[in-house]
Amino acid sequence: MGRLTTHVLDAAHGCPGSKIRVELYRVDGERLELVASALTNHDGRLDAPILQGDDYRSGVYQLHFHAGDYYRARGLNLASPAFLDVVVLRFGIDAAQEHYHVPLLISPYSYSTYRGS
């Protein structure tokens, strides 16, 4: 059974990004369909795959990571508007592949990602 997982690491503080809201959208042309929403745990991971089972199918998706809210909750004084508020990653899934892992490394002024394992 296929699944999509993610986790967040906070490069600015050298720790997992905990309590970050993550939303998954399925992209259909110009329309976004919210598929799931969850908070990262103390280890910066979601407690379960954000996509799996019958919902796991080929297509274009977006993960939205609410990094600005996370840094504000940590007491950082971000500019208004924040340079990075919601980090949006758009990627494709080929359902023939059983597992996609999309991690995020963030700071208030940068991010990076890759397809993990």
Image (cartoon, helix red, strand yellow):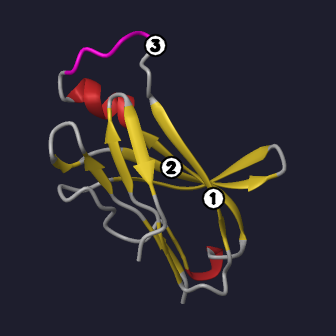
Residue lying at the far right in this picture: please name it: 29
CB atoms of marks 2 and 3 within 8 Å: no
Residue at (49%, 67%) from the top-left corner? 115
Check residue 77 for magenta coloring.
yes
How far apart marks 2 and 1 lie (CA) works out to 14 Å
Which residue has dot 1 on it? 91
* Mark positioned earlier in the residue sequence (2 or 1): 2
Answer left or right for 41 relative to 94: left
Quadrant housing residue 71: top left
Residue 23's label in the rendered image is: 2
Q: With respect to residue 43, does 12 lie above or below?
A: above
Q: Where's residue 116, x and y in %?
A: 42, 70
Q: Secondary structure at mark 1?
A: strand
Q: Secondary structure at mark 2?
A: strand
Which residue has dot 3 on it? 81
Q: With respect to residue 101, does 70 lie above or below?
A: above
Q: With respect to residue 90, does 47 lie above or below?
A: below
Q: Where's residue 10, x and y in %?
A: 25, 44
Viewer-nearest of discs 2 and 1: 1
Range of residues picked out in magenta: 76-81
Residue at (16%, 49%) from the top-left corner? 15
Residue at (63%, 59%) from the top-left corner? 91
Q: Report the amino acid beneath label 3.
A: Pro
Residue at (26%, 56%) from the top-left corner? 44
Residue in the foreground of this view, choosing between 28 and 112 = 112
